[in-house]
Image: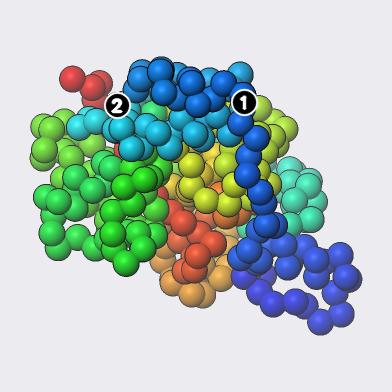
Amino acid sequence: MTDRSGPRAGSHRADNRAEQAHHAEWAALGGPLDSGPTLTTRLATAGPTGLVALVEDPAATLADRLAAGAVLALLGDPRTGERPAVRPVPGGPVEIGLPADRVAAVTAAWAHVGVEEPWIAKENPAHRVVLADYWIGTYPVTNAEYRRYLADTPDAPRPRTWYLGAYPWDRGNHPVAGVRPADADGYAGWLTRRTGHPWRLPTEAEWEHAAKGPAGTDFPWGDRFDPAAANTRETGVHTTTPVGAFPAGRSWCGAYDLAGNVEEYVADDYRPYPGGHPVHDDLVATIGRYRVARGGSFARHGDLARTRRRHGGHPGPLYPIGFRLASSEPPR
């Protein structure tokens, strides 16, 4: 089985529809979002602090949150400063992964979008990991933050999602995407030198624990998928959004966008969990050894937004990947 395959001969029509849904690059053609009647006044009078509050207001409509984020991108978003905002995550023994007896049920729940059992089998067996206390980025790294890195690092490649290499000035507070694992590591090293504070990518176990917490939920907000809580294909936006614009999806530790928007590299390359078996999917066939990515994106369905889902940087436009930072030391 692979993560990317053509229609199988003799398969049922429903299976073909699921495969088509999984591989389709175009989403349904949407229309403008409906904004509230007082939005223009609110945007004109809020100021940066008020706009941040509106972007992250769970009572506001999606259209209002996105509009506030767009204005912030033009004014300068105070959340994209010289040092990333972080959230503390207490360490201790935590369970990582999916019990083997849940693999079939998870596969069946997402069969309508073409999910196959070997992809979910990467998540088992569930196992215990002991984590030290750590701090994880409140948001993924943004285009504006990444631009500062590029200005100091002329030899670093531009993100593949920047059209003709141009900085997307109107999306400064959107997560950067279209970077390689080496670029993410390079950014963390650059910021460490710049600030004197040790930054790195979170380990796979740290990322998962920050997303699902002690309760071990299937999504950062709970066990039931909610397209209003994350920017996935089901949500219908089908492009990146300002960080923090889906406050209903905030995780237990206070981190935003751990589900949807863009996938996020972690520090680990893929390997089977202790006691598990390697899954030789199309990622292995296409790129061999690969860095794990987590969280799903605007271009993919909600199965990839699950807190335990393990994925990677498959080539092509359907897999926009960025990253967030972590640290083993408290911010100073």
Instruction: Name the disc covering residue 198, or none.
Output: none
Residue shown at 61%/65% (left/top)?
Answer: 25
Return the disc, 2 or 1, that comes first in the chain's sequence: 1
In the rendering, at what x and y percent does residue 153 appear? Answer: 13, 54
In the rendering, at what x and y percent does residue 21 appear? Answer: 72, 62
Left or right: residue 222 versus residue 170 is right
Left or right: residue 112 versus residue 213 is right
**Residue 240 or 306: which is nearer the viewer?**
240
Instruction: Name the disc covering residue 78, or none.
Output: 2
C-alpha gap between disc 2 and disc 1: 24 Å
**Helix, strand or loop under label 1:** loop
Residue 71 seen in this snapshot: yes
Q: Amino acid at mark 2?
A: Pro
In the rendering, at what x and y percent does residue 295 appear? Answer: 52, 44
**Display coloring:** rainbow
Q: Residues within 10 Å of mark 2 (few under 14, many from 20)?
A: few
Which residue position is annotated with label 1? 36
Answer above or below: position of 125 versus 87: below
Q: Residues within 10 Å of mark 1 (few under 14, many from 20)?
A: few
Q: Are marks 2 and 1 in contact (CB under 8 Å)?
A: no
